[in-house]
Image (cartoon, grey):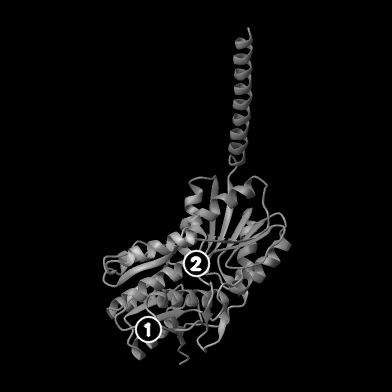
Amino acid sequence: MKKIFIITGITFIAIIIGIFFINVYDADKKDTEKTTRVGLILNGTVSDRNWSQSHYEGLKKTATQLNIEIVYQEKASADNIEEKIDSLVEDGCEIIIANSFEFGDAVQAAAEKYPEVYFYHATGVGVGKNMSSYFGRMYQIRYLCGIVAGLQTETNEIGYVAAFPISEVNRGINAFALGVRSVNPEATVYVSWTNSWTDDESAALATEQLLDKYNIDIISMHTDSLKPLALAEERNVMAIGYNIDNSEHYPNTFLTAAVWDWEKFYTPNILQCIQGKFDGNHYWEGIETGIVSIAPFSDKVKDGVAKVVEKEIERMSSGTFDVFYGPLVDNEGNIRVSEGESLTDNAMLNEFDWYVEGVVIDEE
């Protein structure tokens, strides 16, 4: 009789648990039954093979998992961002994503203007009741790309085409240079500014300036123009890309790239919005999340490089090492980070106005 009671009790508990999970499943299903319109504001285009396309492709992956409809606005700028936001709100978008640092003030103002809409600002740091900012620790991948460049170079002169001298870009330059010099202390990284995220002409000029002036055999980039990769292909200079793996378009010179997988961020965070669980926050997620990664190596990469990079990925993923651990010396000989110390997130995000040893800024 006692055994029958125990079995009956277990059966009853199993039924209760089953009902619970059915209810949870139904709740999740209910959350996604209604189509949610998500507005995506891009400073480029959905087919630019660069920064903006990386966001669009990530959101498309999310759309295969959640019941969302993507409404996008291309070629946004500081001059038209407000009207693009207004247009998306009028179009019924309940979530709006803006993908450029320069949109920060407008997104913050719009979040106050439209409290019923959730806002996400890429590369920013602002937060609010209905606003989050987000980014990935791409500097970790820049460091890995620097290792590739440092082991690959024959001339020890490496070019870096960069958009603006802001913390985000400077952080990447410094991480790249630290990666280079961790395996090749004799190498130098020469930086030329485009003063634009997307302009092809300025990117071409900055690239040509480096290639004409120095004996550069590898070039990397932090710009949303593909001109550095195109010119490298024309002039038979090895190249390291950014945002998306463009190896098929530059078959003779492409080595690898620092790339994004935004679905890893968009899917869980958009689901939170749909479920009414939004929490305004600043997200800065690392290599262990899969948001940032290094693209597969082309056959141009030297033997043995992959093993060195894999070892560094393991160290960073385990949390035992990060790029800006001391001692760090700047390019004027000053100790910036002592041994046993590391840069804070705030310093990396907002106060990076200096360059590490081995970086030369070409001012011409």
Q: Residue at x 63, y 47 (%)?
A: 274
Q: Residue furthest bottom?
A: 364
Which residue was labeled with disc 2?
138
Q: In the rendered view, does 240 fall on the left or right side of 136?
A: left
Name the image quarter holding residue 188.
bottom left
Name the image quarter holding residue 47.
bottom left
* Depth order, front residue of 344/341: 341
Q: Residue furthest top?
A: 1
Residue 41 visible in image: yes
Residue 355, compared with residue 244, is above or below; it is below
| Mark 2 neighbour density, 10 Å: few (under 14) some (14–19) many (20 or more) | many
Mark drawn on residue 186: 1
Name the image quarter holding residue 346.
bottom right
Secondary structure at numbered mark 1: loop
Amino acid found under the numbered disc labelled 2: Met
Image x and y of residue 171, in percent: 53, 75
Image x and y of residue 92, in percent: 63, 53
